[in-house]
Every structure is written in C-alpha cells, then in structure tokens.
C-alpha cells in the first residue's frame, strides 16, 4: 500500500458530503444530461423571436433586478439560493426593487395634477419643464415624444370628470402631426390655446381638423407664436390667414384673442324653442334686377375706350396695351373652375348647342399664374409672384394667357357694366365692374368672366396720352369662370324657388309666363304639373321640352330616369329615336305634326 494512498471512505460518506454541498449551493443539483451541440439554447420552445428589451437595468417593466443572479459562478449561485430561501433584504445581500411607475400611470398622475375641475381647465403648458415629468423621466410630445404619446395624454384627459372645456398646450414645440388625435379624444373642447408652438402652414391645420365637422364646439382658438400666423402677418397676408382658420373652424367666435365678425356659418346652434319656424314662401326677390349703372363719367367715352380700344387690342395685339396700364399698375387673374349650380342644372357644359364646351381645359389657366387663394393657400412666394406690378410685367403676363374673342359689339344683353367714382389717394378714380363672356380662340368654347378696373384720366404729356389712351388702368382684377347665362343680370324680377307649389300671386304668374314663353303652348293640366315643380327641376323640364317636343309628363319621366341630368336625358332620348304612331305619339308630344324619336 502506497504511503500517499488515502484511507477508504466510510460507506455512504460521499453521498452525505454531496448533499451538504448541494444544500449550501456550492454544487448544482442533479440534472438530466443534454446535448451541448444543440443549436437551440432556449429550451424546448426555443428563444422568443421578439425581444422587447436587452437592457439589464431596473425599470418600470422590471419589478425585481438582482445583481449577479444570471452569473454562472459559485458566488452567484450562493446569492440566488440565499434570496430564494429568504425575504428580500433579510440576508444583507444588495437587492434593487424598482419603484418607478409605468409611463401611462405617470402621465395619468401628471394630467390629474394639471386639471382644475372647478373651471374645467386643463393646463398642459410647458410640459418639459414640469417637475413630475423630470422625476419620472417622461418624454412629452414636442420634446422627443411621438404622436402616440400625445394620444395617450389626450385619452387620459378625456377621462377627466367633469369634461374638459378649456385646454392649453402652449410652449410645447407641437406640430400638426402631434395633434391629429386631439379631436378624437376631446371633440367638445370649447377653448384651445396652441400658443408658441411649431404649426407651420394650413396643411398642418388640416391634420388637426381634417373635416369641418370636427371640433364643432370650439369657440376660441389661440395660434399666436406659431409660424403659420407670424409669417402671414409678416408677409402682409394676415387677413388671408384669419380667413383660412375661420373657414376650417366654422364655429369660432374668437381667434388669437380677437373677436370674429359673426357672419352666418354652418355651426350648430342650440334652439331656444321647439316651435316649427315657417319658411318664407316668396317666389321673387323684393327688388328687381336693374340695368347697368354708370355715373361720374360720360357713358359713351367709357364704352368706346373699353370696346374699340382696350378689348380690341386685348383680343388681337396685347403688346399694344403697354400704354393702357399705368407704370405702377397691378394685374392678377383667378380661374374659378367650379361650374355654377344653375349652369350645371341647365347643362351648358354638355349642351348640343355649345359643342365646344367639352374642349375647354383649365390647365393652361392654372399653370399661367392663377391667383386663386383657395388653391395656392398662404404661400407668400406664390401670392407675390402671381401679382404683376408695372405695365411691362402685366403685358408679359397677358401674352402668356390663352387667346380670346370678346364680342363687345354683339348683343348688349351679354354684358353688364357698372361704373362710379371712388377715392384714390389724393385724386378720384373710376371703379368699373364688367360681367360678360368671351370665346376661347383655340377651342371655340365660351367662358364667363368678371373684371374689375380702377381707372384714372391719363396725364397730359404722358406715354399713355401720347399713344391715344385718355384713361389709364391702375388696377385690373380678372376672374375667369365656367360659362353661365347672361340671364343672371337680365333686368326684371329675380326668380327664386317657392317652398309651396300652390303659392300664387303676381310673382308666380310672372314666373310661369316667362317659362312658358320659350316653349309651345301647354294644356291647363300640363301647366299645373309644371308649376308644381321646384324651380331648378322646372327649368330642366322646360329645356327638355324645347329640345325634344315631349310634353311635361314625359319630359319629367325622361329626366327622372336619367338622374335629372339634362345632357344625359337628351342624349338617351336621341339614341332611342324611332318613329311612333297612334295614341302613344299623341300623348307624348306637344305638337301634332309627324315626328320621329
């Protein structure tokens, strides 16, 4: 036996020692063997494919963080077993337990602290400077927070009782995208302050209120300190800014601490009475349409200057107009692409009598500098570029527009002109307002227009006077729009739609006489049927009768089957034209001569 050999251990002594070491945590307990080459270290189900965080720091989602608990050392196992067998803190081993609340709970505490239920006022000014925000390390919107964070705050605010009526979000660096959820959670806000934020333009306002039926209870809005307002006033278009905001928030009464003139907007109003209000039953306006009005100038001189001189040159040689404009004159034009309601009902844009209307195209007008502020918004560069100042720039702009033909010498009823003196600086100018129509040379289509001039007498010895212009243009504003009939300014009673078909009187009789004058004589029953229709439909029926010779009943049926679209009704009528004889023919047509349809 070797001198270095150890004595044989007592039976069972190894098992006792192993159990003691396991109890002390110095060795692991027995575990089944596994293949260490397995490429899936996450156990039977494997590691989760989505890891929410790799942080080892304590936080709101880590209720307990233990130093060294994940280390594979003996010391780590001792600490782990010590903690598992005792309550935290009892062994003296350092244990970190997070007391930080979740972000939602922290924001709820913040919102509750900032709310005054007595005044229903929620003050969310300067959130980044709040001690509670700093304490919980929150990131408010505008300072790193996202639109989702803002939505959380607004949703918490919507849970306050009583409901929030006044909200201030001043001094938060907010943009429109951060406020998109505001109308969703706080739709009944009455007063809103967005003072000193980063709202830049009308598009961001539309992000906040994408439709006019949102935030319909809002009465006061503050946007001072935002680029959209400050830049507008800096560029001299403050009124345009106010108009844009008022148009979007139609219920506003105060904007930027300035009252808004109470023009009738489509805002919900509480009714003080449940009694039905009787609607007016008039068929005409109380005042007639009067003919053109010209005072303060010799009508012949004005007519001659505009027709034989200005419009002749405008239609044929626009560069000759350089001396018709004052060297400091201004000119702008605006293309209004919408079709007037009455013109749409009559169907001018699709009439067989005006086949060139479909050839008209608005793109060249829009691309040539149309100054329609509803389209270009508050872009100061665009607004400035489309206002042409000086006779040379004006003529250059005119030459870039489509060719025209004004039939000033044609039927006088196609044009309406009003003129009267107005103050202009230290002198007196003449304001001239002209309504009429012109033919677009390239297409042959007809457009209507409104043109407003301010004129001054040409000075003796001036370039204008020397070139034959007795008057000079100081201002020229031109609106081009879809064609509508000159009947709009026809002298006489202005017809309106009567609420009650049975209404009678001078107005009703005159209306029926004017309608029936343009169609063949009608039988009494057809006259009654026609008079029972609202004015827009009555006009369409008359137009169908004029174009097809159908009687009133079948004209109504034709329009009803085609959705009251005049162009489609007449087109369908022409497509199914066949010769009919007998009773149906006599019933369908006003005339009794043979006719094919």
Image: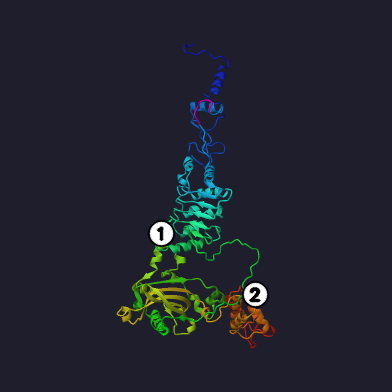
Image quadrant of residue 429?
A: bottom left
Describe the element under mark 1 as helix, strand or loop.
helix
Residue 400 found in image quarter? bottom left
Say which of 394 and 65 sits in front. Answer: 394
Which residue matches tag 2? 500
Q: Which residue is denoted by mark 1 in the rendering?
A: 231
Is 80 in front, or is 229? 229
Alpha carbons under labels 2 and 1: distance apart: 52 Å
Tell me, yes or no, if residue 354 can be seen here.
no
Q: Is residue 243 magenta?
A: no
Q: Is the residue 301 above or below the residue 164 in the image?
A: below
Residue 54 has which mark?
none
Q: Which region of the structure is painted magenta?
A: 89-95
Residue 500 appears in the rendering: yes
**Compared with residue 519, is residue 241 higher up or lower down, i.e. above or below?**
above
Image quarter where the C terminus lies is bottom right
Residue at point 47%, 11% (across, down)? 3
- The kind of secondary structure element at disc 2 is loop
Residue 456 percent across, percent down from the top left = 37, 77
């Amino acid at each position: 036996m070797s001198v270095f050999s150890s004595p044989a251990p007592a039976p069972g002594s190894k098992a006792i020692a192993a159990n003691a070491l396991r109890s002390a945590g110095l060795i692991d307990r027995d575990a089944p063997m596994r293949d260490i080459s397995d490429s899936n270290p996450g156990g039977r189900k494997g590691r989760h494919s989505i890891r929410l965080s790799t942080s080892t720091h304590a936080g709101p989602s880590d209720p307990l963080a233990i130093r060294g608990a994940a280390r594979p050392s003996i010391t780590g196992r001792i600490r782990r077993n010590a903690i598992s067998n005792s309550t935290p803190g009892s062994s003296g081993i350092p244990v970190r337990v997070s007391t930080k609340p979740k972000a939602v709970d922290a924001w709820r505490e913040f919102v509750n602290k900032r709310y005054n239920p007595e005044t229903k006022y929620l003050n969310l000014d300067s959130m980044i400077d709040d001690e509670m925000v700093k304490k919980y390390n929150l990131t408010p919107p505008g300072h790193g927070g996202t639109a989702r964070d803002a939505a959380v705050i607004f949703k918490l605010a919507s849970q306050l009782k009583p409901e929030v009526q006044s909200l201030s979000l001043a001094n938060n660096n907010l943009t429109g995208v951060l406020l998109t959820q505001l109308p969703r959670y706080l739709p009944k806000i009455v007063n809103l302050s967005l003072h000193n934020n980063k709202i830049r333009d009308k598009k961001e306002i539309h992000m906040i209120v994408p439709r006019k039926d949102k935030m319909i209870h809002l009465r006061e809005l503050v946007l001072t300190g935002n680029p959209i307002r400050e830049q507008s006033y800096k560029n001299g278009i403050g009124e345009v800014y106010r108009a844009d905001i008022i148009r979007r928030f139609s219920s506003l009464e105060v904007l930027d601490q300035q009252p808004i003139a109470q023009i009738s907007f489509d805002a919900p109003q509480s009714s003080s009475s449940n009694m039905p209000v009787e609607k007016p039953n008039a068929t005409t306006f109380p005042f007639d349409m009067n003919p053109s009005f010209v005072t303060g100038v010799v009508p012949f001189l004005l007519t001659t200057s505009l027709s034989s001189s200005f419009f002749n040159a405008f239609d044929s040689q626009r560069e000759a107009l350089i001396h018709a404009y004052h060297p400091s004159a201004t000119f702008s034009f605006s293309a209004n692409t919408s079709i007037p309601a009455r013109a749409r009902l009559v169907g001018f844009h699709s009439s067989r009598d005006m086949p060139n209307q479909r050839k008209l195209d608005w793109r060249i007008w829009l691309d040539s500098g149309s100054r329609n502020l509803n389209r270009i918004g508050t872009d100061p560069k665009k607004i400035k570029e489309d206002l042409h100042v000086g006779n040379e720039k004006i003529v250059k702009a005119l030459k870039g527009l489509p060719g025209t033909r004004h039939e000033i010498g044609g039927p006088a009823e196609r044009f309406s002109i009003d003129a009267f003196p107005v103050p202009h600086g230290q002198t007196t100018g003449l304001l001239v307002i002209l309504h009429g129509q012109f033919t677009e040379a390239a297409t042959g289509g007809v457009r209507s227009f409104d043109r407003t001039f301010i004129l001054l007498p040409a000075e003796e010895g001036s370039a204008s006077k020397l070139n034959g212009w007795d008057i000079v243009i100081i201002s020229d504003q031109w609106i081009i729009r879809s064609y509508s009939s000159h009947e709009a300014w026809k002298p006489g009673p202005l017809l309106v739609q009567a609420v009650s078909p049975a209404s009678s009187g001078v107005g009703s009789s005159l209306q029926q006489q004017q309608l029936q004058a343009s169609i063949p004589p009608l039988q009494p029953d057809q006259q009654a049927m026609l008079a029972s229709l609202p004015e827009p439909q009555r006009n369409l029926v008359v137009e169908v009768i004029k174009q097809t010779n159908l009687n009133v009943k079948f004209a109504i049926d034709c329009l009803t089957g085609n959705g009251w679209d005049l162009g489609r009704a007449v087109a369908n009528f022409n497509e199914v034209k066949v010769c009919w004889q007998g009773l149906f023919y006599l019933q369908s047509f006003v005339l009794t001569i043979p006719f094919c349809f």
